[in-house]
Amino acid sequence: MAKVEGLCAQAGMVGSRVEGLCARAGMVNARVEELCAREEILYARAGKASARVEDLCAQEKQLSAQAGVLSAQEEMLYARAEGLCAQEKILYARAEEINAQAGMSNARSENLNAKRGTIHGLLDMILGLPDKISEYILSGLI
């Protein structure tokens, strides 16, 4: 009977040991489930990060295209500015030409006024006419 009691005691210790191992297995299973949940969270975050990277790549392509358009517009503006500078030089040259012509016209006018004064003076000396009549004659001559 002692032998049976010893075996029962050993069976009880084995049972306790099995219960301890089962408890540990349960804790290991809980830890595995927690790690699996973390893995799913990390996969979800990686998916979001991947989508964000794709979005940023698309934005980069869009900004690169816009930069190309702006560069082309800048080149067009530089070309227009060069054209306007050339037109400005032409206009300055024409203005100088007009000023020169105006100077020549003023000189002619002064010359004609001097001649008119001379003729007026001669008419006064020769004919002794009043100024109004001299002016009338001169306006017909010049």
Image: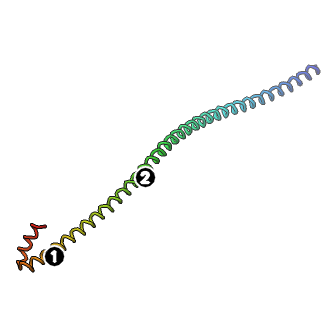
Query: For mark 2, what is the residue?
Result: 82
Q: Amino acid at mark 2?
A: Glu
- Residue 83 appears at what percent x and percent y? 40, 51
Crowding around mark 2 (Cα neighbors within 10 Å: few <14, some 14 to 19, many 20+) is few
Q: Secondary structure at mark 2?
A: helix
Q: Residue at x 26, y 65 (%)?
A: 102
Q: Residue at x 10, y 70 (%)?
A: 138
For the residues carrying marks 1 and 2, which lies nearer the camera in this image?
1
Question: Residue 28 is drawn in which quadrant?
Answer: top right
Query: Disc 1 and disc 2: Cα gap in Å?
Result: 53 Å
Image quadrant containing the N terminus: top right
Relative to residue 47, is residue 88 depicted above or below? below
Q: Residue at x 47, y 42 (%)?
A: 69
**First reached walking from the N terminus: tag 1 or tag 2:** 2
Q: Secondary structure at mark 1?
A: helix
Relative to residue 52, is residue 6 depicted above or below? above
Query: For mark 1, what is the residue?
Result: 118
